[in-house]
Image (cartoon, rainbow, N blue to C red):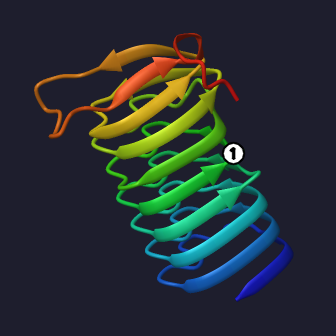
Amino acid sequence: MELRNVEVANADYLFMHSENIRIDNYRQQGNYSFQYCRNVEIRNAVIDSKDAFWGTEDVTVYDSTISGEYLGWHSKRLRLVNCRISGTQPLCYATDLVMENCTMDDDCDLAFEYATVNATLQGAVRSVKNPRSGSITAGSFGEIIIDENIKAPADCELKTWAETTDRP
């Protein structure tokens, strides 16, 4: 399926269980979008959706704004490139999450719980909770919660751009 220059509203559960989707210049308002989808590429989108990309596999989103709580929960190989993220508890329980040159709004709290992640983020990250493994590099971190509930291997490295020579 290929879509270009599409705008949808009140579109709950849009694309659920779909495969092989290519979208460019897309605007959507509606919850539970792209749940359980596979092999999806999205470019130049504005997506306002609670639970977007829940349980997806092999999804890449470029140059987009994604707003809504519980983004990307239980996803596998979700890749976000040059994206702006907003909403509570984003990207938890994700496996092999990649974020390249993304920003997270101040409402992104309790991010990355139990996720395996490799992220390079511009600006601040309000709060991170129990990331499982990988690395997260950001301009700064607010609250970092590492508690007795963290899951092995529990070796995710959190660092600021000031602590690295790998600046973008």
In the image: residue 133, left or right of residue 148: right
Q: Position of residue 145 (x, y in %)?
A: 29, 20
Q: Is residue 123 left or right of residue 51?
A: right
The quarter in which the N terminus is drawn is bottom right
Determine the residue positioned at 36% across, 39% down.
Answer: 134
In percent of width and height, residue 47 lies at 69, 56
User: What residue is shown at x 43% (from left), y 74% (from top)?
Assistant: 36
Quarter that holds the C terminus: top right
The spot of residue 165 in percent (x, y) is: 60, 18
Query: Would you place residue 42 above or below residue 116 in this image?
Result: below
Q: How many marks?
A: 1
Q: Is residue 147 above or below residue 4?
A: above
Foreground pick, 135 / 115: 135
The residue labelled by disc 1 is 83
Q: Is residue 95 above or below residue 33?
A: above
Q: Amino acid at mark 1?
A: Cys
In the picture as drawn, the residue positioned furthest to the bottom comes out as 1
Quadrant of residue 74 in the image? bottom left
Is 148 drawn above or below residue 14 in the view shown? above
Does 102 sit left or right of 154 as displayed?
Answer: right
Residue 61 image-quadrant placement: bottom right
Secondary structure under tag 1 reads loop
Q: Residue at x 36, y 27 (%)?
A: 157
**Residue 62 image point, x, y percent:** 72, 56
